[in-house]
Amino acid sequence: MKLTITLLLLVLAIIIVPLITQKGAEFGGADGEAEGVITEINPEYEPWFSSIIEPASGEIESLLFASQAAFGAGIIGYYIGTTRTKKKMRDELLNDNR
């Protein structure tokens, strides 16, 4: 229980400290930064493809990105949970048969 609380506090600190220490900073994504660097290097560069569907606003784009991340984390968590449970049950079966 102590470990869980400590880890939660650490996560909160990782989230809150940059927001406090970097007031007014713009926390942009890597895509925007990469586009700027590419444009500096080669102003005539044209992307290979463009998005099929362009979200109506930045908030919707963020929501879709967060949803994808949550979905992926859910799949990974499910896999880890089922793998641990299978191993635990297998170990219990082996110990009961001895």
Image (spheres, helix red, strand yellow):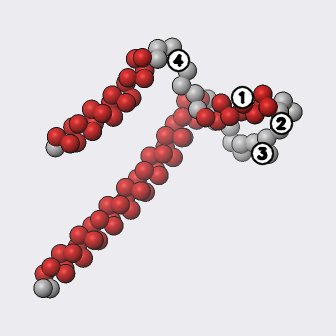
Mark 4 is on which residue type?
Answer: Ala
Q: Quadrant of residue 19?
A: top left
Residue name at image x 38 percent, y 23 percent: 17
Left or right? Give the position of 76 relative to 4. Answer: right
Left or right? Give the position of 52 relative to 30. Answer: right
Mark 3 is on which residue type?
Answer: Phe
Dot 3: few (<14), some (14–19), or many (≥20) neighbours within 10 Å? few
Is residue 80 at least partly visible in the picture?
Answer: yes
- Asked if labels 2 and 4 touch by Cβ distance under 8 angstroms, the answer is no
Which label sits on residue 2? none
- Where's residue 23, x and y in %? 46, 14
- Labels 4, 3: front one: 4
SS state under label 4: loop
Residue placed under numbered mark 4 in the picture: 25
Q: Earlier in the sequence, mark 1 or mark 2?
A: 1
Residue placed under numbered mark 3 in the picture: 49
Q: Is residue 57 above or below residue 20?
A: below
SS state under label 2: loop
Q: Earlier in the sequence, mark 4 or mark 2?
A: 4
- Asked if labels 3 and 1 touch by Cβ distance under 8 angstroms, the answer is no
Measured in 3D between alpha carbons, the distance from the residue under mark 1 to the one under mark 2, in whole angstroms, is 11 Å
Left or right? Give the position of 37 relative to 29. Answer: right
Q: Quadrant of residue 50?
A: top right
Q: Quadrant of residue 62?
A: top right
Dot 1: few (<14), some (14–19), or many (≥20) neighbours within 10 Å? few
Q: Is residue 86 above or below residue 62?
A: below
SS state under label 3: loop
Which label sits on residue 36? 1
Dot 4: few (<14), some (14–19), or many (≥20) neighbours within 10 Å? few
